[in-house]
Amino acid sequence: MGQESKTVSRTLANQAETIRRGSSRLIYSDAELAEYTDTLFELTAKADPTPEEEEAIELMTLLVERYESERYPIPAAEPVDVLKLLLERNSPSQRVI
């Protein structure tokens, strides 16, 4: 784990506090994405998150969605084309359909 990743881990250790201080950051790498995703899973697993944690969840979700949409865009496609592609790749039998 590199120095940058350790810094990100420390920053995300208490994301609610980070947001209170107004110091959240954009995601610039897949390593940071993994850290944010892990932290987001931890926060969303809480039964009764605090208001600060709920805000952290919202902000982190936006940051993750932004990074993923820029890094891994989903091309526009017609539903019938998507279905055809899935059928071609998975070769389901007539009985399954």
Image (cartoon, rainbow, N blue to C red):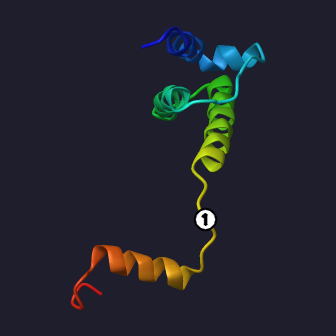
Q: Residue at x 24, y 91 (%)?
A: 94
Rendered view: 85 above or below 71 = below
Q: Quadrant of the N terminus?
A: top left
**Residue, disc 1:** 75
* In the displayed structure image, the side of residue 5 where residue 94 appears, left or right: left
Q: Position of residue 72 (x, y in %)?
A: 57, 50
Along the viewing direction, whichever of 13 and 31 lies nearer the viewer: 31
Q: Residue at x 55, y 13 (%)?
A: 4
* In the displayed structure image, the side of residue 49 where residue 66 appears, left or right: right
Along the viewing direction, whichever of 28 and 49 lies nearer the viewer: 28
Q: Residue at x 69, y 31 (%)?
A: 55
* In the displayed structure image, the side of residue 66 where residue 2 appears, left or right: left
Q: Residue at x 63, y 40 (%)?
A: 67
Question: Farthest residue toward the right?
Answer: 22
Q: Secondary structure at mark 1?
A: loop
Q: Position of residue 57 (x, y in %)?
A: 62, 33
Q: Position of residue 70 (x, y in %)?
A: 66, 47
Q: Quadrant of the C terminus?
A: bottom left
Q: Quadrant of residue 29?
A: top right
Rendered view: 80 above or below 29 = below
Question: Farthest residue toward the bottom?
Answer: 94
Q: Quadrant of residue 54?
A: top right
Give the class, few, some or many, for how many residues have Cα within 10 Å of label 1's Cα (few <14, many ≥20). Answer: few
Total labels: the figure holds 1
Along the viewing direction, whichever of 26 and 41 lies nearer the viewer: 26
Amino acid carrying label 1: it is Pro
